[in-house]
Image: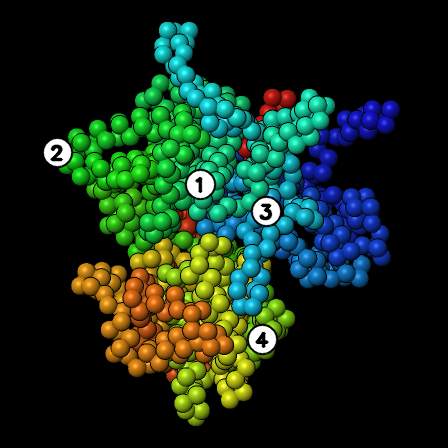
Amino acid sequence: MNKTRSDSRKSALPLSAGLSPGGGIRTGLTVAELKQAFLDNLFCGLGRVPMAATRNDIYTALALTIRDRVFKQGVRTMGTYAEQDARMVAYLSAEFLPGPHLANNLLSLGIVEPTRQALAELGLNLDEALEQEEEPGLGNGGLGRLASCFLDSLAALEVPAIGYGIRYEFGIFDQAIRDGWQAEITDKWLRLGNPWEIARPEVVHQVGFGGRSESWTDEQGRSRIRWVPGTVVKGVAYDTPILGYHVGTCHHLRLWKAEAIESFDFAAFNHGDYYRAVDDKMQSENITKVLYPNDEIIQGKHLRLQQQFFFVSCSLQDMIRVHLVLQRPLDKFHEKWAIQLNDTHPSIGVAELMRLLVDEHQMDWDTAWNVTRNTFAYTNHTLLPEALEKWPVGLFGQLLPRHLEIIYEINARFLQQVRAAFPGDDARIARMSLIDESGERYVRMAYLATVGSHHVNGVARIHSDLLKQTVMHDFAQLWPEKFCNVTNGVTPRRFIAISNPPLARLLTEHINEGWLGDLHQLRRLEPLAEDESFQQHFREVKFSAKHALAALLKERAGVEVNPDSLFDIQVKRIHEYKRQHLNVLHILALYLQLKRNPAADIPARTFIFGGKAAPGYFMAKLIIKLIHAVADVVNRDAGIGERLKVAFFPDFNVKNAQHIYPAGDLSEQISMAGKEASGTGNMKFSLNGALTIGTLDGANVEIREEVCPENFFLFGLTVDEIKELKHRGYRPREIYEQNATLRGVLDFIASGALAGGDTNLFRPLVDNLLFDDPFLVLADFQAYADCQERVSALWRDQRAWTRKAILNVARMGKFSSDRSIHDYCEQVWRVGPVAVGPSGHSMATEFITRPTRTPEHFAA
């Protein structure tokens, strides 16, 4: 009876409920409407009264309140795209690192202050609610953050798009520091629920693994092949809205969760086999359990490949479903969809789309290949050989037997092209084959993505050039028109407006708020770089951010630092090529100098590190231990006082980064030239008024050009110089013997002075530097130390430093992710904006009422 009454009430609701332009309690934006909606969600949604509400209750009620307003825009967007049959960008990424959603949505809706006032009238604090939000654990670092910046910009620029990824139950680990060592703690980011996502249990796709392929004959007598999987799981869609800044466009990030086809074996349970009764559920759900399982063991490789295929297959099936609902022919699929492969993780999509078209939809091979190669584009993010994914043929064939057959066929046809273009060049054939046969046989996934895509891009000019000169040299010779560059960018909404409100206000006061949607407007700040009043306000903003970070460092790292000191910051993934240990060697050089000569003129510095090491990466974890060991010695030395301080900010992520980037005076971007594809931390620091010390690597090259060389601290060997040095034979021990300062530092580490007399603890790191030094730390040490002298000299002149800092902000317009997306639209995707205007209300209402085209039929 109750169910019937509930259903009748639901059906009596007008179809346009909640969609009226005037808003109302459900979607209105006034202080009164926000306050009432918050109370409704607290009372009716959570069953709480204010006096009994926890901080999480308050955050959740507020998130649900804002979500209503965001999803209103999502419905309007779906309606507009359906009406116009818009060409869509589908961004496929194994990682997304969006950061907290609440602040971003408040900013995009333009209701930060009304929301603050609404809560204040209820005796609540918006900042406390913002701080309560758990960071979505869907990414590891730069790759996932870039994907999220791009989704933000796609929505802001009103380019029809959808993001596809994996709904990891446990994300990248939380980092704790125990006795100076990294400890990995399970990231239970969903433990309190996720008010931003909506489950779509009716949007489900089946994904197979293992089994065999078999031949059959269709009704026209043609020979066909079908895959008979050994196991099948289902992918269930979960949608998170991504709202554009001050526009009507709201896209979705669609994440897939793996579930068993039948989650409970009742027969097994009745026979007392309680474990087998839920075994399928456990095995299936393992696929989306954790981000990046350890793939040093074969089980980890198996699970990684399962994850990648699972989300790609779900996503492609979803796009084909939408395409057919729109009653468009599949041989025109590439005219509707522009699919971007974010690195090699989704590259199995090339083989899977071919399988779906040829096997499932009986398309002939040539037509299917034309569709496939005109649908995909591939972004390469690295030149590191270990990051260019390869899968053992045995493992690949066991897990995806039909796809291996398809890859063999793609490879055979592709190598015919190579032979025709380069007759008699057998060495080239071996180098370009999709199957590496030089030892154990591997499937080269980066090559598959390159062959199956219409464009391949690097992510900074130097990276794109090196890509064509090194790992993709043969392919660039075959298809020079296929390769292009799209330099990365970051969203100023997240990394200034949300991270650094005082700076955002200062900029808006002087150049109006249009800069948030057009970062090139920052150029209007240039004349103010000489203005003493503006400089003073700029320094006050920076000091406020440094003071806030100092308080957090005391709370989370137990280190008390002086906000007046130079904040020298290096926060990024811990990796030898990023050379955090070069930074540490310089810190020890300064420390030993002060011990020898306490009167040395060294301006006070606070060195701040942050970042996570991969759980199985011993040397990276040893570098974290070294940083903490140096901090223990330096910070406890009363003779040094506040002149040098070292701190490690634990658990670096987007939420914590929002406290760090605004506080930086000096940004450390010191990777060995030729190893960093782009970097985006360099952009975030510069946008917030930090000067960069760095090599000619990644986006540093273009940042230096934009801000001008005199406003950038450059040091280090270039790519060509490194190549020449390694060709001659690099002997790091000789540099150690010839450089007294460096020798003193390495001997100090080797002596056990940082490890309570234990001479073995850091021996692997010292030996690696002395006898191998693959990333030329010792070769660049003196140049780095000399450059740091120039940093100190400039810091002594605060007016000159501030002038350069302001010019860094003013000249960073190129590095907006809005510009990156514009470049992709022009060079790669050939798509344009579709505005979601006031007419979206009528379209959305009509769209909902159309029986064969409900919102669930569409990927967005």
Q: How far apart, in angstroms, are the residues tagged by discs 4 and 2?
A: 65 Å
Amino acid on which disc 4 is placed: Val
Q: Secondary structure beneath disc 1?
A: helix
Q: Secondary structure beneath disc 3?
A: loop
Amino acid on which disc 1 is placed: Ile
Q: Is residue 198 left or right of residue 755?
A: right
* Nearer to me, 180 or 685: 180
Amino acid on which disc 3 is placed: Phe
Say whether disc 4 or disc 3 marks the residue closer to the N-terminus: 3
The reply to whether residue 421 is in sight is yes
Image position, residue 584 (x, y; %)? 42, 72
Q: Which residue is denoted by mark 1 in the rendering?
A: 298
Say whether disc 3 or disc 2 marks the residue closer to the N-terminus: 3
Q: How far apart, in angstroms, are the residues tagged by discs 3 and 2?
A: 51 Å
Q: Secondary structure beneath disc 4?
A: loop
The reply to whether residue 505 is in sight is no
Q: Secondary structure beneath disc 2?
A: loop
**Do residues under tags 1 and 3 come within 8 Å of each other at their CB atoms?**
no
| Residue drawn at (56%, 64%) of the image | 177
Image position, residue 784 (x, y; %)? 34, 74
Mark drawn on residue 559: 4
Mark drawn on residue 477: none
